[in-house]
Image (cartoon, rainbow, N blue to C red):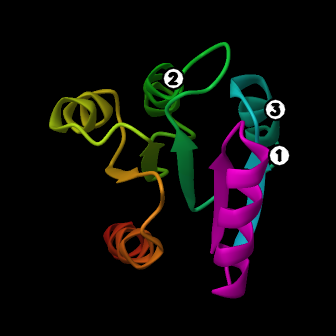
């Protein structure tokens, strides 16, 4: 399974990438919307984990764009954010995310969400 992580914080990206790779996932990365869409020109991942607080376009805007495109509409999206309030979760789901995970990442919970989305697709 190919997972694309869209995260502008190098430390968070490195930590999450390593942990997912140890679980057997192939991990790709992008740091912003421009690099995300450039990568998607050549590779369609099975799942995208995306930070909400990205430079230029935020995760909400990018999720909306991804769900509007026929070629990326079916890719499950997991929002990643430091905001744990219920309103933030609802906003993420409304903008197109399929799941929501807060930082610091509860890795077993994230793995369960990945598995749930894998089964649904």
Residue 9 painted magenta: yes
Query: Along the polypeptide, which appears first: circle 2 or circle 1?
Result: 1
Left/right of residue 89 with respect to residue 97 in the rendered view = left
Q: Which mark is residue 38?
A: 3
Q: Residue at x 56, y 52 (%)?
A: 48
Mark 1 residue element: loop
> Answer yes or no: do the residues labelled 1 and 3 have beta carbons within 8 Å?
no
- Quadrant where the image shows the N terminus: bottom right
Give the x, y percent position of residue 40. 73, 41
> Answer yes or no: do the residues labelled 2 and 1 have beta carbons within 8 Å?
no
Give the x, y percent position of residue 115. 40, 77
For residue 62, which quarter of the picture? top right
Residue span colored magenta = 1-25
Left/right of residue 119 with respect to residue 1 in the rendered view = left
Report the front residue among 5 and 83: 83
Q: Residue at x 63, y 86 (%)?
A: 23
Left/right of residue 110 with respect to residue 37 in the rendered view = left
For residue 30, which quarter of the picture? top right
Left/right of residue 67 with respect to residue 31 in the rendered view = left
Would you name the residue on which mark 1 appears?
42
> Answer yes or no: do the residues labelled 2 and 3 have beta carbons within 8 Å?
no
Tag in front: 1 or 3: 3
Q: CA distance from mark 2 to mark 3?
A: 14 Å
Q: Which mark is residue 87?
A: none
For residue 120, which quarter of the picture? bottom left
Mark 2 residue element: helix
Give the x, y percent position of residue 4. 66, 54
Report the number of numbered marks: 3
Would you name the residue on which mark 2 appears?
65
Query: Along the polypeptide, which appears first: circle 2 or circle 3?
Result: 3
């Amino acid at each position: 399974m190919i997972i694309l992580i869209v995260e502008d914080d190098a430390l968070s990206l490195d930590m999450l990438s390593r942990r997912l790779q140890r679980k057997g996932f192939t991990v790709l990365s992008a740091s912003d919307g421009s690099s995300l869409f450039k990568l998607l020109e050549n590779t369609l991942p099975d799942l995208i984990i995306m930070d909400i607080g990205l430079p230029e376009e935020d995760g909400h805007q990018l999720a909306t764009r991804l769900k509007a495109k026929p070629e990326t509409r079916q890719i499950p999206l997991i929002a990643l954010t430091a905001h744990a309030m219920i309103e933030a979760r609802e906003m993420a789901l409304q903008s197109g995310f399929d799941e929501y995970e807060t930082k610091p990442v509860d890795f077993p919970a994230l793995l369960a969400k990945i598995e749930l989305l894998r089964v649904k697709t």
